[in-house]
Image: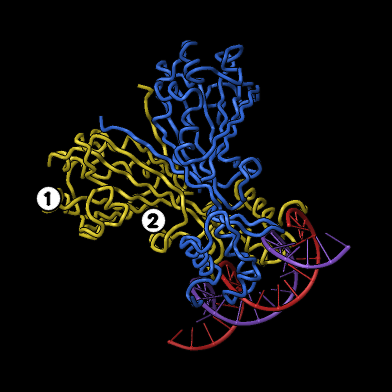
Chain colours: A blue, B yellow, C red, D purple
Amino acid sequence: MSINKPQAEFLQVAALLRAAIADGEFPPGSQLPSEPELANRFGVKRATINRALSVLRSEGLVRPERGRGTTVNEIPVIRRDTAGRQRRETREAGQARGAFEAELREKGLTPKTVVSVSEVPAPDEVASLLEVNAGDTVLARGRVMYANDTPVQLATSYLPLDIAAGTALAEEDTGPGGAYSRLAELGHAPAEFNEVVRFRAPSESEIRDLAMDPDQRVASIVRTARTAEDRIVEVNVISLPAHQWELSFNWSAE
Amino acid sequence: MSINKPQAEFLQVAALLRAAIADGEFPPGSQLPSEPELANRFGVKRATINRALSVLRSEGLVRPERGRGTTVNEIPVIRRDTAGRQRRETREAGQARGAFEAELREKGLTPKTVVSVSEVPAPDEVASLLEVNAGDTVLARGRVMYANDTPVQLATSYLPLDIAAGTALAEEDTGPGGAYSRLAELGHAPAEFNEVVRFRAPSESEIRDLAMDPDQRVASIVRTARTAEDRIVEVNVISLPAHQWELSFNWSAE
DNA sequence: TCTTATTTGTTCGTATGTATT
DNA sequence: GAATACATACGAACAAATAAG
């Protein structure tokens, strides 16, 4: 386990620690030795250990906390099935928000969702997709989703007021089948969906609400639901800590 | 432009530089001032500038090079349309590998693809998907794709030898419509596709072949093509520098 | 070709701050 | 309050790659 020169020491230490965690020397939930101890073990300065740990932290592998020590993370990777979740039978089988909860229970995690509904000025990108003026008021259905009390997903669904105001869509509980079933009843059934996934640094609010580190990354998904008449009736902006999700897509050759 | 306490200095400097680049003070392709100059401008030590630049580098925004200085990157975000690219009309309209080249030309970039075909032992994950024994020989069709001579994508398509050996699939040029048209002619037409996307640190070979930095991230895509008889006849492993791509997916409510 | 200056990458040693125990 | 642990910053030094002469 000696330190060679060709690669930077902090990268070699990061690799050794990553291997030690994978080998089970430091199982999920356990504490790593303190930085001074690790510095002694690898024969480097504490600053180098600190930098190596920041590499593992950015990968979501460990969670260092001031005064407490460094813990090996436990949350496994959660799979998100993209195209399956909007099918009517899927929505109705699992009650509302069934897709997310099923994904978590599949991994042995306990899901929790907190919903908040409000009217807000439309963000620029949302306004142009919904074809309203920038800053016009729209309905925002925000959700924060947790796995074992760890926040793992933020989602905000934006709907135009001329469709949603005064309907069940403005209630916290949209009822059986969820928002898409209500849209259908109102004569705006979504027919086509699109999702665009981008990968970027977390915003201030994402760092706070998802308990993320600035050098971790979020997968940002913008989903649009379009009617047969080609009107976008919903824009859903979703943020996921990228290291704890995998995204699955299915389609047929037609 | 003053430095407050609540956030770390290197994060504040990173934010200021990010804003300066967005404002056009440092346009794409231009050089940033040297680290000592920036240290003077912001009133911090060079080590702090170096760390701030490493933040921007991990986001793919700048490219510091020893001895040369720090350049603002030019490659824009490339969109990848997931479900559209396997449709027969799409494949045949653009010749083989049309999807990738169309994506790049749309952004004003010049595409280039280098293909290599060989027989290799199947990696574990590939072997289990193709239902061959671990280490069994399979056909590997590797591709490295470039935009303006910058590598932007690695892809390796694995095919079982009992299907592909001695056919056009083992040639560098698979002919009109590409590999999926050949599979169809051989009686193994793909009917269903699945892609799983994960975000992770780059491997050593990805750092080398994609000219990536260790603290950047790759989007790793594993695509499987399945026949109507439910046999997986191709596994395609794709690596993208995550910061320069966006993934788009379309589907209908059916 | 060789030398020198410039520029970024990394490490060391030290010090201080902040949160937790 | 004291001890422990991680976060950050400073100042210095050297290495490695490049550019200029």
Look at the image and tell me in which quarter the C terminus of chain A lies: top left
In which quarter of the view is residue A83 placed? Answer: top left
Q: Residue at x 41, y 44 (%)?
A: B197
Q: On the rendered structure, is B163 left or right of B224?
A: left
Q: Amino acid at mark 2?
A: Pro
Q: Chain of mark 1?
A: B
Residue B130 bears which disc, if any? none
Q: How many marks?
A: 2
Q: CA distance from mark 2 to mark 1?
A: 29 Å
Q: On the rendered structure, is B173 left or right of A67?
A: left
Q: Residue at x 57, y 74 (%)?
A: A42
Q: Observer-nearest residue: B254 or B82?
A: B254
Which residue in the protein does label 2 denote?
B151
In which quarter of the view is residue A91 placed? Answer: top left
Q: Is residue B94 above or below residue A74?
A: above
Q: On the rendered structure, is B205 left or right of A235?
A: left
Badge 2: residue crowd in 10 Å (few <14, some 14–19, many ≥20): some
Query: For the residue labelled by badge 2, is the local secondary structure a helix, a strand or a loop?
Result: strand
Q: Is residue A204 above or below residue B60?
A: above
Which residue in the protein does label 1 denote?
B167
